[in-house]
Image: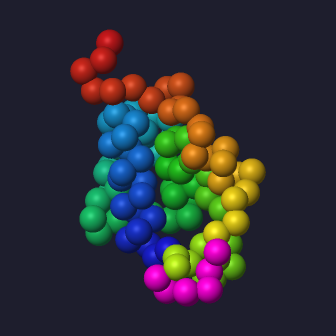
């Protein structure tokens, strides 16, 4: 996953959670401007900001060996292995603080 993919994933999570940049800033301890810059198309957050954003969005950052999770199209011999973590993520409900825009 490259930098742009990480930023795109954070943007998608923000949109899915219905949180505004101001709400994310409040949860993360970052300034509104830092959140806005980090979650822009040209975003380049520092590691400390990235970790704060990830936590504020109810996510966690994990490291994996390069090539881990490759798709069958890139590696025809790849067979995904179901893990407890993968099942838990797939079945996890939306974070309790996630709200939709327009909801009270």
Q: Give whichever of 81, 86 is nearer the camera.
A: 81
Residue 2, compared with residue 88, is above or below; it is below
Quadrant hosting residue 17: top left
Relative to 69, say whether 91 is above or below: above
11 left or right, relative to 51: left
At horizontal 49% and vertical 86% (from top left) the residue drawn is: 74
Residue 7 location in percent, x, y? 40, 62
In the image, residue 5 sits, relative to residue 99, either above or below, namely below
Q: Is residue 31 visible?
A: no
Residue 98: horizontal and vertical position, in percent?
45, 29
Q: How is the image coloured?
A: rainbow
Q: Residue at x 52, y 58 (%)?
A: 50
Work out which residue is located at the far top of the displayed protein and give it. Answer: 104
Q: Nearer the viewer, residue 51 or 64?
A: 64
Q: Write down the quadrant of residue 100 in the picture.
A: top left
Q: Which residues are magenta?
A: 73-79
Could you tell whether 54 is left or right of 86 in the image? left
**Secondary structure mainly formed by the magenta segment:** loop
Q: Is residue 47 visible?
A: yes
Q: Is residue 85 left or right of residue 22?
A: right
**Residue at left offset 29%, top offset 69%:** 42
* Image label count: 0
Q: Residue at x 56, y 64 (%)?
A: 47
Above or below for 87 versus 72: above
The outermost residue toward the left is 102
Horizontal side of residue 52 vs 21, given as left or right: right
The question of residue 22 being in magenta is answered with no
- x%, y% of residue 15? 33, 43
- Give the percent coordinates (x, y) of residue 11: 36, 52
Name the residue nearer the viewer: 75 or 46: 75
The C terminus is located in which quarter? top left
């Amino acid at each position: 996953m490259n930098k742009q993919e990480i930023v795109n994933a954070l943007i998608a999570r923000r949109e899915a959670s219905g949180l505004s940049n101001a709400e994310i800033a409040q949860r993360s301890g970052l300034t509104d401007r830092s959140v806005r810059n980090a979650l822009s198309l040209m975003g380049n957050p520092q590691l400390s900001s990235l970790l704060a954003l990830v936590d504020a969005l109810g996510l966690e950052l994990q490291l994996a060996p390069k090539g881990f999770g490759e798709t069958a199209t890139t590696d025809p011999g790849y067979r995904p292995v179901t893990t407890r973590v993968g099942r838990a993520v797939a079945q996890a409900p939306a974070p309790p603080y996630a709200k939709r825009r327009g909801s009270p």
